[in-house]
Image (cartoon, helix red, strand yellow):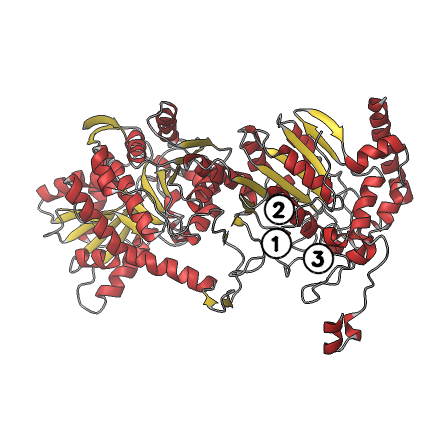
Amino acid sequence: MQAKTTILSLPTEEFVHPGTRACTGCGLAIAYRVGLKALGKDTILVVPPSCLTVLQGLFPIASTKLACLNVTFASTAAAASGILATLKVQGEDNIKVAAWAGDGGTSDIGLQALSGAAERGENFIYLCYDNEGYMNTGAQRSGTTPIGAVTANTPFKGKLQQKKDVPAIMAAHNLSYVAECSAAYPLDLFDKIRKCMDMPGTKYFHIHTPCPPGWGYDPRYGIKIGRLAVETGYYDLYEIVNGEFKLTAASEKLVEKRKLIPVREYFRSQSRFRILTDAQIAVIQNQIDAKWANYYKKDE
Amino acid sequence: MHIIENGNVAAALGVKLCHANVIAAYPITPQTPLTEKLSEYVEAGEMKAEYIPVESEHSALAVCIAASSAGARSFTATSANGLLYMHEQVHWAAGARLPIVMCVVNRAVGAPWNVWNDQQDSISQRDTGWIQMYCCDHQQIIDSVIKAYWLAEKVSIPIMVCYDGYILSHTYMPFDVPDQEKVDAFLPPFRPDYALNTEEPANLNTVTLPDVRMDIKGEIAHGYMEIRYLLHEEMRTALTVAAEAEKRFADIFGRGGDPYVEPYLCDDAEYVAVGLGSLTYQLRVAIDTLRKEGIRVGVMGVRFYRPFPDVAVANALKGKKGVIVYEKALSYGYEGALASDLKSALYEHLAGTGTLPFVQNFIAGIGGRDIRTDDLTQSLRAATKSRVSKEPVWIGLKL
Amino acid sequence: MCWLFCPDVVISRTIPPKIDLEYCKGCGICAEECPTKAITMVDEAGFSEEDKDKE
């Protein structure tokens, strides 16, 4: 059993310069910084249009210290495949390829290429940072925006549809590794990346990423809100290793604790959920309770 | 070595001889047999390449763009709607200055659906910054693929090698397959100035602003406008480099000619028919017929559509009475794209000199409508009597 | 904790932590997450040029 990384054992080398163009309190900046520590310097990154594109800065200056290819919106996973092919013909065995894309670029416009790459068994890590909307362009709804969220193009009724479960879609591709993580639990993210790096085929990461302007909260509460998502049982930290599902970190502890914070606290912490009625929240609470009843049963 | 094979195989052999090492493939009629052939070469070990059967054409070019950025010699092929699906990437590859070679097996575009030949697909990509070469027979197909890699890698501009679907892709012709040693002498391995790597990491194709910015050394770096200007400038210079390619090729392989135009009986012609691709060879039959009637007419194929060889074309047509442009595509709402470009070149170089011919535009073969040589002969004969119409005239229309 | 959660890589992993105020965006996550409440956010407007360097 691999020892869990702690703050003291986390590598100190940084792969991002300060002075990125991310928003104040950006959740992605945290996830990205720790994620790159896990990936290390022998990595080539692929990035589609997204908050990350902006975070990395404007030509001719970039804040990321690693090699990175910016690509078109729909083509992230295909571009990763192209780099992998080249590394193979060049005989470069030690260079990893990691794609970082937003939820829009993954669950919507990028899904086709991702599915194709996963089906072909392309050997790279795909990390989707899910800030639950097209935040870079002003917070429009995406496939992973949760139901009820007010966004720039669901301004009065909120999103009417359920959040798309992308990890489940990816798990259906028989991948060696699928993980759900959160920017609020960076050490869990670090360990999972390190764990799966040498596994074959496409490894898929879905990272819950709090976004102050998009979600509507004071930036200082970003980590608290990320934690609340997990501690209410609304969003779970897990991994699926060769088809076997397992809760991890704080979510795993919740199975022992058998006590979830009511999800209304999570919704009331962000202004984007302001139009959710008590009745709607009750429905969601029931869904969460049912999901966790299942987890508890499996644990017995 | 002389063989008899179809145009798709000719193209595939060209790609094999050039040692392309990353191939992206997505099926679309009538290109499919080309990439199927490449899969045979790869799986049989005759090509040391990674073959990626992608899930869409947009991804096919994405693979090539990424592979080329990392230093591989990449290839893909497509037609019609496949080319249109990757249109965003077509612009991208040119802007990123990547020497990708792509075969476009010309086919009509939807809507409505049509799998037969016309040239709307590649013509519609005219303004993307790709070099476009048009082939008239299988020898030109295999030779153009080889020349294209050399030219593309010299000028860092991607190249579309276009040939007519079915008419060339699926028909059988004898042609010479060059010796591997000669190809290796002509085309050295791909050595880009920069390829993505972890020792000297770089962030490629980041966001640019309208104005120029300073880099970390305190020097002003090129802005978007400068980058795009250079693409255009270097495309114009590519005309000269293309002539160099043609000469080098002729020196090593013993065949070649004018890099820009392929004339037939044009020297003493009063009227010249102009076109792109195999249609110009079919027009030679019409030319022969009309010559027997005493009409001094010739036909000229244009080999590079972009960059447009305006000087070569204007020189070839200077002093002719009329130029009759036959096209299998058009810019809807106005006229054939080749006719427009030709008019602009003739005006630019010949206006006011008394040597400006009229330009007659005929549209034929749209959606693979059979182009009867008789129709070519009749239309050409009519045009040599007087300009038929200032609007493009559609041949073979059955309203 | 502050070092771990800083989105802008401006805090050192030392005790006490050193914060690069040139690049700090003032999000306040460090202050919020500190288990001993050792960091306080102060509005930039309240500082003169010299005071900033003293922090």
Which mark is drawn over residue C12? 3
Q: Report which quarter residue C22 is drawn in.
A: bottom right
A116 or B342: nearer the viewer: A116
Q: Secondary structure at mark 3?
A: loop
How far apart marks 3 and 2 lie (CA) works out to: 18 Å
**Residue B52 image offset from top left, x and y in percent:** 46, 32
Left or right: A42, with B178 as reference point:
right
Task: Read off the chain for label 2.
Answer: A
Quadrant of the image containing the C terminus of chain A: top right
| Residue appearing at x 9%, y 52% in the figure | B268
Query: In the image, are marks 3 and 1 on the same chain?
Result: no
| Residue appearing at x 85%, y 37% in the figure | A284
Amino acid type, mark 2: Leu
Q: Which residue is mark 1?
A: A16
Task: Read off the chain for label 1.
Answer: A
Amino acid type, mark 1: Val
**Residue A276 image offset from top left, x and y in percent:** 85, 46
**Residue A224 image offset from top left, x and y in percent:** 82, 49
Q: Residues within 10 Å of mark 2 (few under 14, many from 20)?
A: many
Q: Residues within 10 Å of mark 3 (few under 14, many from 20)?
A: some
Is label 1 in contact with label 2 (beta carbons under 8 Å)?
Answer: yes
Which mark is drawn over residue C36? none
Residue A108 in view of the camera: no
Amino acid type, mark 3: Ser
Q: Nearer the viewer, mark 3 or mark 2?
A: 3
**Residue B289 image offset from top left, x and y in percent:** 13, 40
Q: Between disc 1 and disc 2, whose residue precedes?
A: 1
Residue B74 in view of the camera: yes
Q: Which residue is mark 2?
A: A36
Q: Is residue B152 above or below residue B176?
A: below
